[in-house]
Amino acid sequence: MKRIAALLLAGSLALSSCAGPAVAAEEPVETPAAARIAKEEKGLKTAIFAGGCFWGVEGVFSHVKGVKSAVSGFHGGNAASAKYDIVISGVTDHAEAVKITYDPAGGRYDELLRIFFAVVADPTLRNRQGPDVGAHYRSALVPTTREQAAVARAYLAQLGKSGLWDKPIVTRIERYKAFYPAEGYHQDFMAKNPRHGYIVRWDKPKVAALKAMFPTHYRSGFLREAS
């Protein structure tokens, strides 16, 4: 029975929208350092990032120094609909998102924003990232403090004037509602499934770009939630 269950799980993952059809991958972008630096007090902070399939968002931030926790989950809808099979049907208000707990002494919020738009999410894509399409794959920033919100607004405006993209910035800032962790098999997905086809094609290149572009922020070991 365990073998059958494992095969069924593998099949469901292969068919899930986080393993969509192959299309051209976005290239990493040399995003600028933020002009508006985050002024954060000592102590751990939290922030939420939505940028397509949460496997890659979590995977990248799990390799960023200063990040103490990266949890895949859902934001924007209600508790009853915060289930993977329901969210990927596209009938909820949720976005696949990752809740980051970080120490500003190791990496400020503005630095996390720069990394996010450099190697994780294309801010010009509306309701999609990579091969994944739907409002639940929208790119969004969910600040949890006034300072984060101010920094996020300033950085989106800075990116809009940067000329890095031909299309307008559509990433939105969303008000925090509630974050619901995803099912256990989604947590640490990249570390648990390094040979998964989606991970190899879409997410490992993001981690490689993080290492190449932000060597002082890169952590070689994967931060596991179970550790």
Image: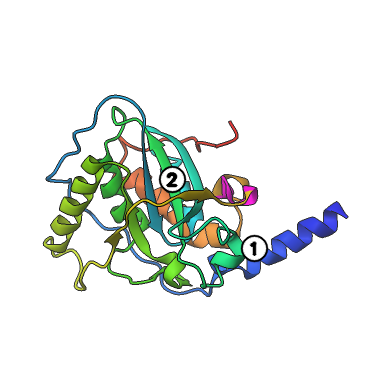
Q: Residue furthest top?
A: 42
Q: Where does label 1 land, which residue?
A: 13
Q: Is residue 54 left or right of residue 192?
A: left
Identify residue type, mark 1: Leu
Label 2 sits on what residue type? Lys
Magenta residues, start to end: 184-189
Q: Is residue 84 left or right of residue 24?
A: right
Confirm whether residue 110 shows in the render: no
Q: How far from the left and from the top, in percent, is residue 12? A: 68, 65
Residue 222: x and y, percent? 50, 38
Image coordinates for residue 202, horizontal then vertical, percent: 47, 61
Say if 143 sits above or below 21 in the image. Answer: above
Observer-nearest of 107 and 76: 76
Q: Can residue 112 be seen from the camera position used here?
A: yes
Q: Main secondary structure of the magenta part?
A: helix
Report if residue 181 lies within the magenta region.
no
Sequence-wise, the earlier of marks 2 and 1 is 1
Residue occupying image coordinates x 64% and y 63%: 13
Q: Quadrant of the C terminus?
A: top right
Q: For residue 214, which quarter of the picture?
A: top left
Residue sitting at x 43%, y 45%: 99
Marking on residue 99: 2
Crowding near the residue tagged with mark 2, few <14, some 14–19, many ≥20 C-alpha atoms within 10 Å: many
Query: In the rendered image, which quarter contains the N terminus?
Result: bottom right
**Circle 1 Cα neighbour tier, 10 Å, few/some/many (<14 / 14–19 / ≥20):** some
Q: Residue at x 36, y 51 (%)?
A: 176
| SS assignment at label 1 | helix
Label 2 vs label 1, nearer the camera: 2
Which mark, by number, is residue 203?
none
Quadrant location of residue 121? bottom left
183 versus 133 height, above or below: above
SS under mark 2: strand
